[in-house]
Amino acid sequence: MSTDALERRAAADVVAGAASPPSGSGMNERILQINDFCVDYGVDEGAVRAVDGVDLHLDRSKVLGVAGESGSGKSTLVYGFTRLLRAPALITGGTAFFNVGPASEGGPDEFIDLVTANEATLRRVRWTQISVVIQSALNALNPVVRVGSLFNQVFKAHRREMSRADRRTRAIELLELVGLNPDRLQRFPHELSGGQRQRVMIALALALDPQLVIMDEPTTALDVVTQREILGELAELRARFGFAMIFITHDLSLLVELADEIVVMYAGRLVERAGARALYDAPRHPYTLGLLNSFPPMHGERQELTGIPGAPPDLSDLPSGCAFHPRCPYAMERCAAERPPLAKLSEEGRYVACWLHVDEVHATVPVELRRAVPTTSAGEGGAT
Ligand code: ATP
Ligand code: SF4
């Protein structure tokens, strides 16, 4: 991400906060805990809610996949809790506790609420502890700044103690990590291919050893071969450095290989959450099933792609009850009247917002939405 992009002021006003940070025996493993997080665009009658009451958490070294069609709120969620959104975005509720480590050696980990943190605190955390690879590498990289200068800017801003020689050595090391020749340091972004630019973005994101890396559709604009190469490299980098990752995409089949857990968003809300393999093998929400039927699988036999009928809803005029009901092949009378909560199922780690499952009376659940989860994959994560 360019310095410009990272230094974008968090212009979104904040009217949220409160709640308590994570506590208890597992707290040192937790790096992010988001509760009841809401973001609106605009105010008063003109406001639309783009993220609505999202709860999620992420533990160290884990990968959380965020999936959903265009406009489902994926980017607003992550740019919201990292406070990178500009007005007219307004955080209207919730907390986002991030683990900044112990205040003194051996002490318990401390959490800051990113939602209410001031600019100085956010500056300290961004890039050094949380970095973001935004959607379009071409737009994110300043076209008139050579790649080497981009690395220099990051180190000068955050590692003032580094000498010029150290900065160059580290930049070369980072380029090599992502499979780029060090001569790319002399190049301008427009002289690189899409895949090379994306690799530069990833190298910049890793420059300061963050513990959380957020990837917003980093491979969407790339051909399938380059996409596979970059995903493979990311898996290796994670295995080596152990950072946690939030990976946003509309392609669920891509997430199953990468993520430990997946959340699926529709109209700003989480509609399903489960272990990656379990969600892929046995989706419970009709929207998740529709998403899975919209993309060819990465491996295995060819399948007919049926997609999802209709289009995502207009946030200023959301359907009543379950927002998915006008597009849902299983919709019942109740669906248009009442909004289903994200409810925990008896199956480990599975949460679903759908009336078909809320009572878990299997007789009412279509067979394709009550597939057994293979025992080897129940509740497990992805390949990495
Ligand atoms: P994509 O995959 O296309 O990036 P997304 O799932 O990340 O989509 P968001 O970009 O977060 O979705 O958008 C969520 C909703 O917020 C969309 O309905 C969008 O129209 C709306 N939205 C985004 N930016 C603004 C804005 N500046 N003003 C008003 N509404 C906005
Ligand atoms: Fe479909 Fe009803 Fe479930 Fe919504 S609640 S996904 S409309 S069955």
Image: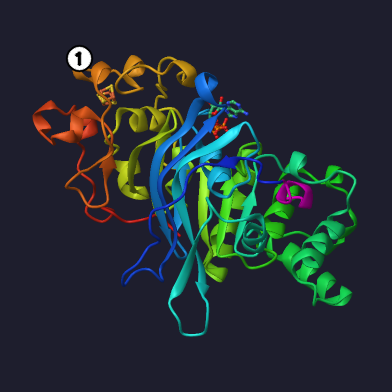
Counting labels gives 1
Does 342 sit left or right of 293 as displayed? left
- What is the x, y in percent for residue 183? 87, 61
Q: Is residue 344 visible?
A: yes
- What is the x, y in percent for residue 145? 88, 50
- Nearer the observer, 73 or 306: 73
Colour approach in the figure: rainbow
Quarter of the render that holds ligand 2:
top left
Q: Quadrant of the C terminus?
A: bottom left
- Nearer the observer, 163 or 224: 163
Q: Name the residue that disc number 1 marks.
A: 333
Question: Ligand 2: does it lie within 8 Å of the C-beta at label 1?
Answer: no
Extreme bottom residue here? 106
- What is the x, y in percent for residue 369? 23, 32
Q: Residue at x 34, y 44 (%)?
A: 273
For residue 24, above or below residue 142:
below
Q: Residue at x 78, y 44 (%)?
A: 193
Q: Residue at x 45, y 19 (%)?
A: 313
Q: Is residue 262 visible?
A: no
Type of residue at label 1?
Answer: Glu
In the image, the segment drawn in magenta is: 1-8
